[in-house]
Image: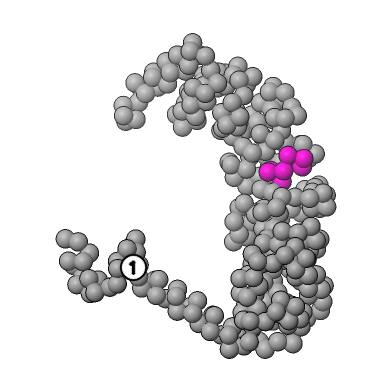
Amino acid sequence: MTDLDSDPSLSRLPAYLLRYPNPWGLEHRREKGLKQLRSVVDRCRFGYIGLRLDELLEIVRRLDEQPVGTATMLVDDLVDRIGAMTTGEVEQLVGVLLDLHRREMPGWCRLHLDRGLQRLLFQLHVPKAHDLAYECACSERSHRRWAAYKFYGEHGLDEQARCLLADQVAAGTLEEPSNAAYSFYPGALIARDRSLVNRLGLTAVLAIAPTTQHRKEAIEAAMTELAPTDIAAICVDYPQELVWAVRSQDRTDYLPIIMDMVDDYRDDPYLLHRVVECITRIGRPDELDYAVHVASMILESSPAAG
């Protein structure tokens, strides 16, 4: 029985809705549409839509004087406009946001600015935005720091951000994730920055990188500076990340190290399968034959694996 057969009301829908991937999701589509429709109508009623950018920025500049509840609409309008702004206009917006960030404002206004920066900052593709991101990264307000981390996740670290994070690592004050995406966590930003990985040292970075993916990326960054034996010694407690990095980079100079892992990790089928996969990429036929032989013996002795 088709959806149309089980629910005759669907057959009365216009063709463009019948092409919707999941007809049962139409209620969610309607709710989302009502929310967005309400937003655009409210913006029209408050007179934000249709303003010249300089007029809108002047209203934003006086955010603490605006009626409570209008900040979200202002941010909505700015988000809609960013893609069409010139570099100079984005610089103007950054200047307004910097001024607001530095200004003393009522608590409700500071909170709205926090949320606005989280939505806007990472979309600002101009040099001056790095100054705003740095000031937010130094802020006592957690939402602004996370706005900065999101910015750096999108645009990469600059030198002042590297110095800030390096100092935090040295002091043991690096911020840990709290209801935020791991990719924006400072440890992740460091792991993805080759310059900072090699400045801090791979050992220190592996200790703060939040996920296997980030540790693998840190190892790849360190591979440009350190010999395979040095990398292997540092990664003794991170064998999975090491194998992943070697395979990803096609580093045949690591083959002796990977071959030793065939015997070292016989008791860990999950890791061994990663090792064998790596050898299929970087090994020669005789080395692959040995790895497959070891893996086959383990499979034969473990019927449940079949």
> In this view of the protein, which residue sits in the foreground, 206 or 76?
76
Which residue appears at 31% of the width and 26% of the height?
Answer: 303
The answer to if 42 sits in the magenta stretch is no
Seen in the picture, residue 268 relative to 97 is either above or below; the reply is above
Q: Secondary structure at mark 1?
A: helix
What kind of residue is marked 1? Tyr
Residue 144: quadrant of the picture: bottom right
Tag count in the figure? 1
Residue occupied by mark 1: 16
**Residue 29 visible (yes or no):** yes
The stretch of residues the image draws in magenta is 190-197
> Which residue is pictured at 65% across the width and 78% down the height?
74
Q: Quadrant of residue 216?
A: top right
Q: Quadrant of the C terminus?
A: top left
Residue 62, image x, y percentages: 76, 83
Q: Residue at x 78, y 73 (%)?
A: 96
Q: Is residue 74 above or below residue 234?
A: below
Residue 267, horizontal then vertical, whole percent: 47, 26
Left or right for 131, reference 305? right
Tell whether 283 sits left or right of 208: left
Q: Nearer the viewer, residue 93 or 179?
A: 93
Compare residues 287 and 21 and report the one nearer the observer.
21
Query: Is residue 159 positioned above or below 215 on the image?
Result: below
User: Mostly what secondary structure, the magenta segment?
Assistant: helix
Residue at 54% across, 80% down? 40
Tell me where residue 142 appears, x and y as whole percent. 70, 65
Q: Is residue 296 left or right of residue 259?
A: left
